[in-house]
Image: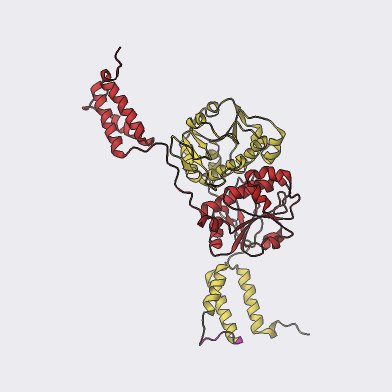
Chain colours: A yellow, B red
Amino acid sequence: MAEALSLNRFRVVLSRPGIPGNIGAAARALKTMGLSRLYLVNPKHFPHPEAESRASGAVDVLANATVCNSLEEALTGVSMAAAFTARRRELSLPMQWAREAAGTLCEAANQGGDVALVFGNETYGLSNEELAICQLPVMIPANPEYSSLNLGAAVQLMCYELRMAAVAPGEAPASFGELATVDEVEQMIGHFQQTMTASGFFNPDNPKRLLPRLRRMFGRIRLERDEVNILRGMLNSFQFPERFRKPD
Amino acid sequence: MAEALSLNRFRVVLSRPGIPGNIGAAARALKTMGLSRLYLVNPKHFPHPEAESRASGAVDVLANATVCNSLEEALTGVSMAAAFTARRRELSLPMQWAREAAGTLCEAANQGGDVALVFGNETYGLSNEELAICQLPVMIPANPEYSSLNLGAAVQLMCYELRMAAVAPGEAPASFGELATVDEVEQMIGHFQQTMTASGFFNPDNPKRLLPRLRRMFGRIRLERDEVNILRGMLNSFQFPERFRKPD
């Protein structure tokens, strides 16, 4: 399965997470986006019931998490590590926004190495030493007046961007009904014209903008075939009520 | 401010939220992405200390939240409402994925009306009745084997997509140092060649792939001017060590 191959190359590394709930939220974020490999560097509390509660159906990701004593250990075997930073600090490397970074990281993963997303402590972020061993500083676009995303939310966003870059989302599910074709809609417009002419509402010698406006309105609502049939039945009933009225 | 104008047209509506922490997480998600208008339809517990705790620096969004008795009330004055659904249920309207929907919703907001993002209860989602009064069903691409995003995480993702659609993220912050120009890098390569020729490492009559490989390597790391100067100083020291050695 192409999807698993690509997304399984990604590790999500939380360095010194302080709040157990955020570890659980991160696990859930990974799994919803098809990732599975969580690394925890010196977590303050782990395992913890609050992590399990927030992980919900992703407790398997928690159970399989790798606990490390240093960021270096968590990055063993990694060919590219992205460091998430909220502050516009002095960076020694060019930074990328999350969406662009997702493309860069998927390319790296496709070249065969493991790729890591590294997130720092909730309060302090990543240290300068941690930043220095990562190759790609990444920022998530945010409100400049309040850019403090929750750790689990930041992990969710970036895993989503990776999924969007790595996996085609597939066809939008078909709407319940089949859409009407252009000619069916046009025949219906003709039916409206005929009926409105008969009723006196439409004057072919002075048409104004009536037909274009009908066309515009129905064009916007992407009519289904069943709806066209309903509308035409309704028009028929206006034009020939005697055919529709029930005998007393 | 163009940004505020557009994003302030959006309401985020949580229908029957059951977990107070999720209300707080949603408030924080809104504010980090520059949105501010939170509507709560029959929240199970509100206000609640857990909501305030999870809202962190977005308690103002919580304090200004509008509590309603029905979804209809929350949608008063709204020209387009997007309904978030995780299941591929039978939809009476064509569905859009989150990213495409963000574009559709920003267009609607730019036409002047208010636009709503409607999220259902954590366990049950939106009812069929609630879905029916929204114009646009939206799904977030997710792992088909576990697509259950946390409510706050789903709000975060969609607010992010709206921000990405509505606000240019701005220039990537400049890297710490000024980048070297192409000619500065070429002069440095020439300096390498000269020094390596003098040292005997490079044979101009049999150059092999040495210079192209150096160029490729330095091309990949986007050298800064200071780094070029450091490297050239180092080359000088190799070529003319007598100029660099301190007198004993």
Image location of residue A70, percent across then percent down: 56, 26
Magenta region: which residues? Answer: A199-206
Q: Residue at x 59, y 68 (%)?
A: A223
In the shown orientation, is residue A33 left or right of residue A103? right
- Quarter residue A163 falls in: top right
Residue B155, given in percent of the width and then of the height, sits at: 62, 50
Question: As displayed, is residue B54 above or below residue B136?
Answer: above
Q: Is residue B141 visible?
A: no
Q: Nearer the viewer, residue A27 or B3?
A: B3
The answer to which image quadrant residue B6 occupies is: bottom right
In the rendered structure, the answer to whether residue B228 lies left or right of residue A158 reads left
Q: Main secondary structure of the magenta part?
A: loop
x and y percent of residue A192 in the render?
58, 79
| Identity of the residue furthest to the right in this view | A248
Q: Quadrant of the C terminus of chain B?
A: top left
- Would you say residue A204 sits in the magenta stretch? yes
Near-viewer residue (B67 or B207): B67
In-front residue for pair B184/A185 = B184
Q: Position of residue B66 (x, y in %)?
A: 69, 56
A127 inside magenta stretch: no
The correct choice, above or below, for A158 with respect to B3 in the image is above
- Residue B3 visible to the viewer: yes
Q: Quadrant of residue B197?
A: top left
Determine whether A182 is above or below B221 in the image. below
What residue lies at 63% left-to-right and 61% top-to-bottom?
A: A176
The count of marks equals 0
